[in-house]
Amino acid sequence: MQRRHDPADISTAAQEYLLALRAMGSDGRAATSAQLGRHVGVSTQAASEMCRRLASDGLLEPATGRGLVLTTAGRAAADAIFRRHALLEWLLTSVIGLSWAESDAEAARLQGALSPRVEARLDDLLGHPETCPHGNPIDLETARRRPAGVPLSDLESGTRATILRITEEAEEDPGLLSYLEARALTPGAHVTVLARSESLDSLTLDGPRGRATLGLRPASLIRVLPGEADPALFHRVPERGGA
């Protein structure tokens, strides 16, 4: 039986790798050591060494021809780390007022120091969110219950849709996050595709703050639901009354 790993017992570097593997595997594909190294910003050799440590700790399947695959314990550990990160992002954006890009960097610094008691109190304070502020499910169980959505880049001109989530891969791009937040292209936002061009590699939307243009690649990292989605899919932090 695989033992459960407390995020506090996992090094900061290992946490970064687990989150990277979680994000890279979110579309069902296994990553290679070279891809993981590029994602984290290290050499393939350094990524391979960390993967050997993760496998030794029971968090990563032994090396096979099918790429890097988290074990059940590894996925649970990655989810636990992501949950702490997501709770901190909700706190930093909805309570403290930081931007998406700022909150991601701050949450990465704070997540390793969060105690289980504070984590539970944060969860209560924030209304028990099932996703991060970008709409990504907080754990595997939640992901199975929520719709997958379709890439925004697949929609044809004239299609109306609701933004479901900004994928974890898109979260790696602070510039893209800042643009989407500035245009209010956030989970729950209603959009209409005005134009889509393969030759110009662009997609133009009418959104909450008027027109917005994205390349097809960034648009492929945004998941939407055609038409108007159930508002219950989108978490809102409860307002707290004054003293």
Image: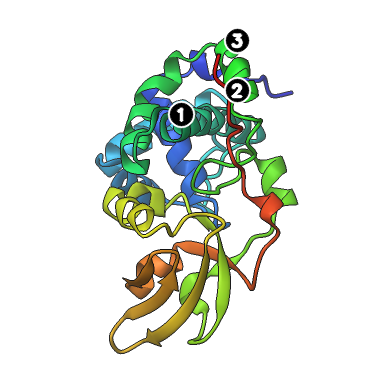
Q: Marks 3 and 2: in contact by CB < 8 Å? A: no
- Would residue 59 be seen by someone viewing this image from the given angle? no
Which dot, 2 or 3, sits closer to the camera? Answer: 2
**Which residue carries the number 3 mark?**
117
Q: Residues within 10 Å of mark 1 (few under 14, many from 20)?
A: few
CA separation in Å, label 1 and label 3: 19 Å
User: Can you name the residue that lies furthest to the front here?
Assistant: 243
What whole-number distance in Å separates the C-alpha atoms at marks 2 and 3? 12 Å
Q: Which residue is mark 1?
A: 95
Q: Secondary structure at mark 1?
A: helix
Kindly identify which residue carries mark 2.
125
- Dot 2 and dot 1 residues touching (CB under 8 Å): yes
Mark 1 in CB contact with mark 3 (< 8 angstroms)? no
Q: Quadrant of the N terminus?
A: top right
Where 236 sits versus 165, above or below?
above
Quadrant in the picture for residue 217: bottom left
Q: Nearer the viewer, residue 50 or 210?
A: 210
- Mark toward the start of the polypeptide (1 vs 3): 1
